[in-house]
Image (spheres, rainbow, N blue to C red):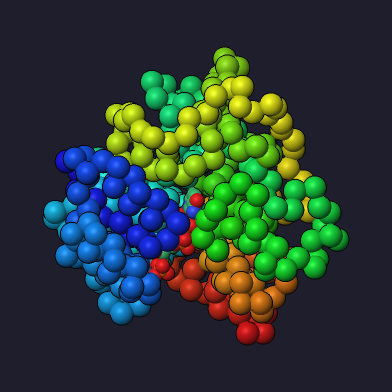
Amino acid sequence: MKRVVILGSTGSIGTQTLDIIRLFPDKFKVVGLAASRNEKLLAVQAAEFLVDRTVLFERDGMEALVALATMPEADIVVVSVAGVIGLLPTFEAIRAGKHIALASKEVLVAAGEIVMPLLREYNVTMTPIDSEHSAIFQCLQGYRLDQISEIILTASGGPFRGKTRDELSHITVQQALNHPTWNMGGKITIDSATLMNKGLEMIEARWLFGVEMDQVKVVVHPQSVIHSMVKFKDGSVLGQLGWPNMRLPILYALTFPERHPNDLKNWDPTDTPSLTFEKPDVDAFPALNLAREAAKAGGTMPAVMNAANEAVVAAFLQRKCSFLDIPSVVDRVMQEHSAVSATLTSIVEADREARIRVHEALGI
Ligand SMILES: NC(=O)c1ccc[n+]([C@@H]2O[C@H](COP(=O)([O-])OP(=O)(O)OC[C@H]3O[C@@H](n4cnc5c(N)ncnc54)[C@H](OP(=O)(O)O)[C@@H]3O)[C@@H](O)[C@H]2O)c1
């Protein structure tokens, strides 16, 4: 019986994690739940799963969230809050020796340089929930990281695949929220439309799998059946396939290294008439190059890119800027930043400043 805390239990990943736990009552016990402000759903979840430790971040604050993430009764902490706000609880949960199941890629984007050594220091396992990283993680079982030649992340291409930069200038919030294959929270759905989600995933992959940024490639694969691939040094390529459904990577992240039979719809090769691949259009979607630049600059730069993106996406969702402002404001804030080496303090400070710069740039 694994005892689980979920940070972000009321969101898309959080509720799907509870769906999985509901299927395996003899394998998991939920011991803590946290949300930001959805008190009603949090109470419903606590009642169903008989959980007496809950945190509502907007009411209880960061200290309470960290206390939940480090509670002695927990074995696994699922980090599925939207954004880098999950950094401190993740950091402290690692120091408390908890297994981390990570959905909040922003944590590794901003602070991979300090989180990865911390995992080694405390001998803690981090299993990825992101379907691409789960795929790579699965392909790598039995291999050493130094046998990797390339990580090939697949991208659905988002709702605006094939559109030119000009055609993107009048995109509305409603259009951007309409993702073709995945049903997700607002922030990640916008990130998928700008392809910043893939940029964030490139940096996440670089840290999780210990490769250089140049070794991380992106290919657009609209069917989202191949969840990602690894090319090894001998040229052999392994991929992991399945229907686009987050419940399977969530299950694997919770049960690794075991595999449990379940009722999720299985994929069969004859179900998909064709699997297609194309190169991403980096002119219409500059976020991929921004992520490469941020990773190459290193230090606090990825945290700045991430924070600027979080702030400008929030502004877009509030209809305070245009779709194309997203990459251009992130770019501008990155140009204005001189990276310094990454520590928890420098990352938090760089994050705070980047958000202020976004508000200045947008005049809000
Ligand atoms: N959705 C997917 O399919 C998917 C796939 C791969 C990776 N991810 C990653 O998973 C993370 C979550 O995505 P999502 O789509 O599940 O987002 P979401 O639907 O917006 O849910 C976010 C969750 O985090 C909670 N939350 C936000 N700030 C918090 C805080 N400070 N303390 C505690 N809880 C907080 C929210 O609570 P309230 O409900 O109270 O606001 C909600 O439960 C993101 O990093 C995303 O990139 C998501």
In the depicted structure, whether residue 269 falls above or below residue 53? above
Residue 105, position in %: x, y? 47, 52
Q: Quadrant of residue 145?
A: top left
Q: Tell me if 88 is positioned left or right of 192 in this view.
A: left
In the depicted structure, whether residue 285 falls above or below residue 149? below
Q: Tell me if 95 is positioned left or right of 286 in this view.
A: left
The residue shown at (19%, 65%) is 53
Q: Tell me if 348 is positioned left or right of 314 in this view.
A: left
**Ligand 1 located in image quadrant:** bottom left
User: Observer-nearest residue: 180 or 71?
Assistant: 180
Residue 293, position in %: x, y? 64, 52
Q: Quadrant of residue 319?
A: bottom right
Residue 73, position in %: x, y? 14, 54
In the depicted structure, whether residue 106 falls above or below residue 131? below
In the depicted structure, whether residue 22 falls above or below residue 221? below
User: Observer-nearest residue: 344 or 40?
Assistant: 40
The residue shown at (24%, 63%) is 46
Quick one: which residue is furthest to the top in this view?
234
Residue 260, position in %: x, y? 31, 30
Which quarter of the rendered picture does the C terminus lie within?
A: bottom right
Which quarter of the rendered picture does the N terminus lie within?
A: top left
Q: Is residue 322 visible?
A: yes
